[in-house]
């Protein structure tokens, strides 16, 4: 893939805003939510040349600092290298490695190395990917040259601590229409602070989705099209100057491109409409006004709807499905008392007209008050979920193999799940747009202890039918320098954010909010004296609603990081919000 020069220039310039030496804390923390989120702010550092007679430790610290400050092709950073290493080192040709804050140099005699958890890699297009290897190990191979210690083996590219990365970059969601083009899917990018504007947003969209997301995105709206100048703003209209190739787009392709640009302009101030131009001529798009522009609000029609108000919690109570509101349980209409059921997990559609549960016979659904139907028979089923379009999803487990299913009105669609081969899946949830799935996956740690971590995959469609899970990638979560390796449950909190119930290997479980890359993470809830086993969560226009079921089968309602309420004393088996 061709890398546009502006992307590399912006990524390189951002490095002057931070230092890769050893800071692990910001200057301000807001309690109870502690955060390493990508936000406003940032710091600046001016690197210094190596002093005469510098020790190996001083050389490494100076080099890490100098890597974070761009100027004259990293001239200061190169002063810490041997002549040969300086001549061959070209960090612009490699990804940026992000390692856990708190990682410090390790000294052994005159040699210095670094070893610590890897957060991930920042690609040259601004997309982020979790590292394939969980640990970064690097020996800088110090040698004497002209009587001074110098580094003979620098990293291939730049290396930034997690803290410094969050201080130097800001996260932006670009949006692309899935194939078939019915829904916008976010594609997070990380750009230098201060570099985000209407031209940058447009370039990212025209450049196309990240390699990870590209497997489910229609490339035709961007075929051989490029931005031919700066995006100008006049009375709220962003004029997009495109290359002559844009005149070959049909109206559907041009409309798709305009919608993607409109959605990605959401955080750009002053933009209310978008107009596509090529060689000064307006390109026709659907939904346009007399001036050929479309309102950026049109993009909302291609996003999953959000919950507008507080939702009622649904629970299992004594073999019946009930609602829990104002500390009162209300059993749903039906012959529950005459025929109580075994219900181990529960799902409720957004409209609340459809309910599904896992029982002794398999996956059972009730629609519109009709008789229950067993839709999927399996000895072991994970908790089902509805997406925002009302599609029901389930995962069956057989002989160590996980299989994703979409439960249609007339048939069950088995989605090719070979991407999960060899994984022990213990939980999942489909995104509101129905195009991504987050999984809780079991894995063995280096010490042999079982871990449960997160990963995400895409759902490929053909003719509006899901066909396969593709493009698996891990989500590596790190909090205060330690990996969160004991994940209990996970829920979507928006188009590109997650709520995670979990902990590192040595502490009780806590509640964390994170983006889907695992880069910006906040602690939302401190560990409690009770042990959680299941979470129900939904994000509404008035804020998040979070409920926890503990191992004693009591329910707890989240208030804030310090407070949980106990709305009812009944023993419950499972719980769910409409989703």
Image (cartoon, rainbow, N blue to C red):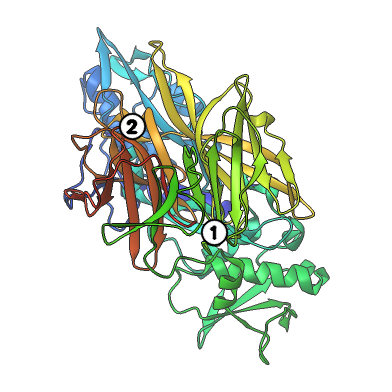
- Out of 264 and 411, give the one closest to the viewer: 411
Residue 180 horizontal/vertical position (percent): 74, 58
Dot 2, how many residues are within 10 Å of its Cα: few (below 14), some (14-19), or many (20+)? Answer: many
Q: CA distance from mark 2 to mark 1?
A: 26 Å
Looking at the image, which residue is at 29% across and 17% down?
149
Q: Which residue is most to the front?
A: 338
Q: Is residue 475 left or right of residue 223?
A: left
Q: Earlier in the sequence, mark 2 or mark 1?
A: 2
Looking at the image, which residue is at 50% across and 88% down?
235
Q: Which mark is residue 566?
A: none
Q: Is residue 360 left or right of residue 578?
A: right
User: Is residue 84 visible in this depiction of the protein?
Assistant: no
- Out of 412 and 158, give the one closest to the viewer: 412
Helix or strand or loop: what does disc 1 sit on? Answer: strand
User: Is residue 456 visible in this depiction of the protein?
Assistant: yes
In this picture, is 31 found above or below 359?
A: below
Residue 249 horizontal/vertical position (percent): 80, 69
Q: Are marks 2 and 1 in contact (CB under 8 Å)?
A: no
Q: Quadrant of the N terminus?
A: top right
Q: Which mark is residue 174?
A: 1
In this picture, is 165 found above or below 255?
A: above
- Out of 498 and 226, give the one closest to the viewer: 498
In this picture, is 176 found above or below 297?
A: above
Helix or strand or loop: what does disc 2 sit on? Answer: loop
- Out of 191 and 353, give the one closest to the viewer: 353
Instruction: Report the number of discs.
Output: 2
Residue 323 horizontal/vertical position (percent): 39, 57
Q: Which residue is most to the bottom?
A: 290
Residue 225 horizontal/vertical position (percent): 73, 62
In this picture, is 473 found above or below 544?
A: above
Q: Which residue is mark 2?
A: 100
């Amino acid at each position: 893939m061709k890398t546009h020069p502006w992307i590399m220039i912006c990524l390189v310039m951002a490095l002057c805003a931070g230092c890769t030496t050893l800071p692990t804390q910001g200057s301000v923390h807001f309690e109870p939510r502690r955060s390493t989120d990508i936000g406003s702010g940032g710091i600046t550092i001016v690197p210094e040349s190596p002093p005469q007679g510098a020790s190996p430790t001083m050389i490494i610290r100076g080099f890490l600092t100098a890597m974070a400050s761009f100027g004259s092709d990293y001239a200061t950073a190169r002063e810490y290298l041997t002549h040969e290493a300086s001549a061959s080192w070209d960090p612009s040709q490699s990804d940026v490695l992000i390692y856990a804050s708190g990682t410090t140099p390790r000294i052994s005699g005159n040699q210095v190395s670094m070893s610590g958890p890897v957060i991930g890699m920042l690609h040259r297009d601004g997309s982020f990917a979790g590292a394939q290897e969980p640990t970064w190990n690097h020996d800088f191979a110090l040698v004497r040259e002209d009587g001074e210690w110098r580094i003979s083996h620098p990293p291939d590219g730049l290396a930034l601590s997690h803290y410094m990365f969050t201080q130097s970059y800001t996260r932006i969601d670009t949006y692309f229409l899935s194939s078939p083009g019915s829904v916008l899917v976010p594609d997070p990018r990380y750009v230098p602070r201060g570099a985000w504007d209407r031209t940058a947003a447009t370039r990212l969209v025209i450049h196309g989705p990240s390699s990870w997301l590209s497997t489910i995105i229609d490339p035709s709206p961007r075929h051989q099209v490029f931005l031919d100048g700066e995006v100008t703003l006049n009375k709220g209209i962003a004029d997009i100057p495109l290359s002559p190739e844009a005149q070959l787009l049909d109206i559907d392709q041009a409309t798709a491109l305009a919608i993607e640009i409109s959605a990605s302009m959401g955080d750009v101030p002053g933009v209310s409409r978008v107009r596509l131009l090529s060689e000064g001529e307006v390109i026709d798009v659907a939904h346009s006004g007399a001036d050929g522009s479309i309102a950026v609000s049109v993009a909302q029609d291609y996003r999953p709807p959000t919950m507008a108000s507080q939702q009622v919690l649904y629970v299992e109570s004594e073999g019946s499905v009930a609602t829990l509101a104002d500390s009162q349980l209300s059993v749903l209409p039906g012959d529950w008392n005459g025929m109580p059921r075994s219900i181990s997990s529960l799902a409720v559609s957004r409209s609340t007209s459809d309910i599904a549960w896992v029982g002794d016979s398999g996956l059972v659904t009730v629609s519109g008050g009709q008789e229950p139907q067993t839709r999927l028979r399996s000895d072991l089923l994970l908790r089902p979920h509805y997406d925002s379009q009302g599609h029901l999803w389930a995962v069956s487990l057989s002989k160590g193999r996980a299989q994703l299913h979409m439960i249609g009105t007339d048939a069950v669609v088995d989605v090719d799940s070979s991407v999960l081969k060899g994984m022990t899946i213990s939980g999942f949830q489909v995104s509101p747009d129905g195009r991504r799935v987050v999984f809780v996956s079991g894995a063995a740690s280096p010490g042999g202890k079982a871990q449960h971590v997160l990963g995400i995959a895409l759902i490929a469609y053909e003719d509006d039918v899901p066909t396969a899970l593709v493009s698996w990638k891990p989500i590596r979560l790190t909090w205060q320098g330690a990996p969160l390796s004991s994940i209990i449950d996970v829920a979507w909190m928006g188009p590109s954010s997650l709520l995670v119930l979990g902990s590192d290997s040595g502490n009780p479980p806590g509640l964390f909010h994170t983006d889907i890359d695992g880069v910006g993470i906040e602690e939302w809830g401190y560990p409690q004296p009770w042990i959680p086993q299941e979470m129900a969560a939904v994000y509404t226009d008035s804020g998040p609603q979070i409920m926890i079921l503990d191992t004693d089968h009591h329910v707890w309602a989240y208030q804030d990081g310090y407070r949980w309420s106990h709305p009812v004393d009944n023993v419950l088996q499972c719980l769910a919000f409409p989703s």
